[in-house]
Every structure is written in structure tokens, then in C-alpha cells.
Amino acid sequence: MVAKLALENGTVFTGESFGASAEVTGEVVFNTSMTGYQEILSDPSYAGQIVTMTYPLIGNYGVNLEDLESTKPQVAGFIVKEYFDFYSNFRATSSLGDWLKAHNIVALQGIDTRMLTKMIRTVGALRGVISTADLDDASLIDKALRSPSMNGLDLAKVVTTGKTYEWDAIDKTPFALKPIGRAKKDGRPWFVVVYDYGVKQNILRRLALYGCKLLVVPASFPAEKVLELQPDGIFLSNGPGDPSAVRYGIENIKKLLGKKPIFGICLGHQLLALALGGKTFKLKFGHRGANHPVKNLRTKKIEITSQNHGFAVDSDSLNSMLIEITHVNLNDGTNEGLRHKELPVFSVQYHPEASPGPHDSEYLFDEFISMIEQEHAPAV
């Protein structure tokens, strides 16, 4: 079936549909990962976006029920150079195309993804529309121009959980993993409240493996109620959209600063920076892939990281008397991490849970547990 992608700059690509027969608008972005398309598709941080894979062949290992980062695909649409329907993997339960059709996700193959990627790198992320129904170029371009921008858009409220729930099962992982965390002296796990702005399941798995019992709460859950729960620590998750639009999240974090140890990832990092008085800005085309080099300014080591974000923290906007910049992106020099000099608070822009991606930054979960332990250590 013929399908078209039209961009707000007037460019139109014609290809073939391998997903649902429908029409969808979104911000067109690209991801440079060679594998992990299932994790990417089910990552809530991609809500509202049409994701283009730069690796040319996608679909060859199918889809399974164990590698999902949420309960369903979260992308607005999906674009590849070549889709491979005849999958082969011992864990696969269906083809990628069938899975996308079952969840009504529009997908396009057969276009020049290198041209599209170079265009996005040159002019920045573009609004677009994929359609299998309307194939009129002028009509599609007009729809792309009228689609919403990511600037000022709060998508955390769209993807967050509707109710609180507990997560303490470390067996929710593709392969059995032995716990590597440190429980309390009485043997009980550390109790961590997780703010769900679009949390990935592998983040929950890693926290559980490090000895945490988790209570996941909605993005707008009041800070006062969090403190009433008396957690040992608080985690701020990843998520989609413009961080400056998540005002309720910023205000809640302000009330929690200094009360409990806090660890943030991705959107959680940005919201923490805003709560600390900093600013954020939209990147030209974002960081999305599993091979981004980041320098740890404390250890001077280079970490290869998994990333997925379209906004970044302005390091110059942070109070250097109180905030230490801990990590920096070696591709463009943008902020990748911060730590409060007095309070038990730190965060990173990238994804140390590595799903998909390398495990160079696994140590950050251990640092969070160490921070919690220090807060509970008896005064000397």
C-alpha cells in the first residue's frame, strides 16, 4: 500500500506502508541505534514523535513480549529504509509489522532515510504527517504545517500512570538477573517513590535489582503526599515533551529538595534543573541513539551512552555556587548531568538503564543507593 510522508518545509516522500492504514502527525526525528527498535518504539519519551531509524534494515528479529519499555508502542509513527517481514529469533512472538498494525501505529518503508536524516540535521526537527489515505501533496503539507509543535507541550500528563502501583518484581526481565543491591540492615528493601513522567520499565527493573521496593506515582502526585509515605529516596523518571510545560512537576520537586535523596533521568533531570532555578532549551535535532559519548567530569572517564531527548539544560543558567556540572556531551558540549553541592540530589540527561544501549553508566544506580545509605547512617 502506498503511503506518504510530508514535512512542514514542503518536502514529500513516497513509500510503502507496513503498519496500520491511517494518518498521523508528529515531530519527525531520527535514532541512530542499530538494534533495539522494540524498546525505542515502546519508550514513552517518544510520544508525539515520528521516529526514523538510520540503520537501513529493521524488523529482522521480530517482536517479543519481554523487551517492551511500556505496555504498547508510544511513537506517533515509524519510518525505516527497508522493513524485513521474515523475522528470525527464538524469543519472537510476531513480526514488527503485525505488532504495529495491532496497535494502530502507522509505519513507512522505502524512502531515502539518509536524505531525511541529513535534512533534519541541517534544518532541525520538523513537523510531519504520514498518511495511507490522503495522498495529495498540498493537503499533506498543510496538515504538517497545522500540527502542534513540541515547544510548550506537556506530554508527561498524557503518558503517566493513572494510579499508583507497586513494583518489586525483579523477575520482570528477559533473563533471570541476580539482585545486586544492598538492602537495609534489617533485610528490608529501600523504599523509593518513582515519579512517572513516562518511565521505562527497565529503569524500574534496575532500581529493583539494586534493592529497592518501588511505588510508582502519577506525574502530578502532590509532594506532600510523597513525604507522608516516608520514602527512603525519590526517583524522577524520563518522559516526553517540553520540560518547562510541566509546571506541576517543577513545583513538586521544589518542595522535595533537601527532604529526601533524589535521582533524576532525562526529563527528570530537566525538571530538577528547572526546580533548582535553571533553564532548558530545545535542541536543533535532539540526541537519540545508543552511542553518544559523554565525559564524566568527576572521573575524567568517557561513557558511551543511550540517549533520547529533544531538550537540554542550560548549564550557564545554574548557580555554580550550589550546583556542580558532572557530565558533558562530547558531540556538542551540552549538559548531561548535575549534582547539588549540599543536598543529596543528582541527575543525568542520558539513560543509564541502557535499553537499548551500553552499560557504561550502570554505576549511577549504585550511587543512588549509596546516597540513600549515607542519609540513613548514624550521626558520628
Image: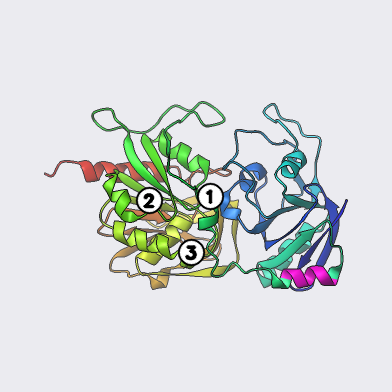
What secondary structure is the stretch in magenta mostly built from? helix
Residue positioned most to the front: 163
User: Mark 3 or mark 1, which has the lower sequence index?
Assistant: 3
Judge whether residue 142 is colored magenta.
Answer: yes
Across the whole image, how many numbered discs are drawn on residues? 3
Is residue 171 rendered to the left or right of residue 75? left
Identified by mark 2, the residue type is Phe
The answer to whether residue 97 shows anywhere in this view is: yes
The percent coordinates of residue 142 (x first, y second) are 77, 73
The percent coordinates of residue 228 (x first, y second) are 27, 47
Is residue 260 rendered to the left or right of residue 215? left
Judge whether residue 134 is colored magenta.
Answer: no
Q: How many residues crowd mark 2 within 10 Å: few (<14), some (14–19), many (20+)?
A: many
Query: Closer to the camera, 332 or 344?
Result: 344
Q: Residue at x 35, y 55 (%)?
A: 222
Q: How many residues crowd mark 1 within 10 Å: few (<14), some (14–19), many (20+)?
A: some
Residue 159 against residue 26 in the figure, above or below? above
Label annotation for residue 304: 1
User: Mark 2 or mark 1, which has the lower sequence index?
Assistant: 2
- Give the quadrant of residue 150: bottom right
Residue at mark 2: 263
Secondary structure at badge 2 equals strand
Between marks 2 and 1 in the image, the one whose residue lies nearer the viewer: 2
- Give the quadrant of residue 64: top right
Identified by mark 1, the residue type is Ile
Query: CA separation, marks 2 and 1?
Result: 20 Å
The magenta stretch is 138-144
Identified by mark 3, the residue type is Pro
Residue at mark 3: 243
The answer to whether residue 53 shows anywhere in this view is: no
User: Mark 3 or mark 2, which has the lower sequence index?
Assistant: 3
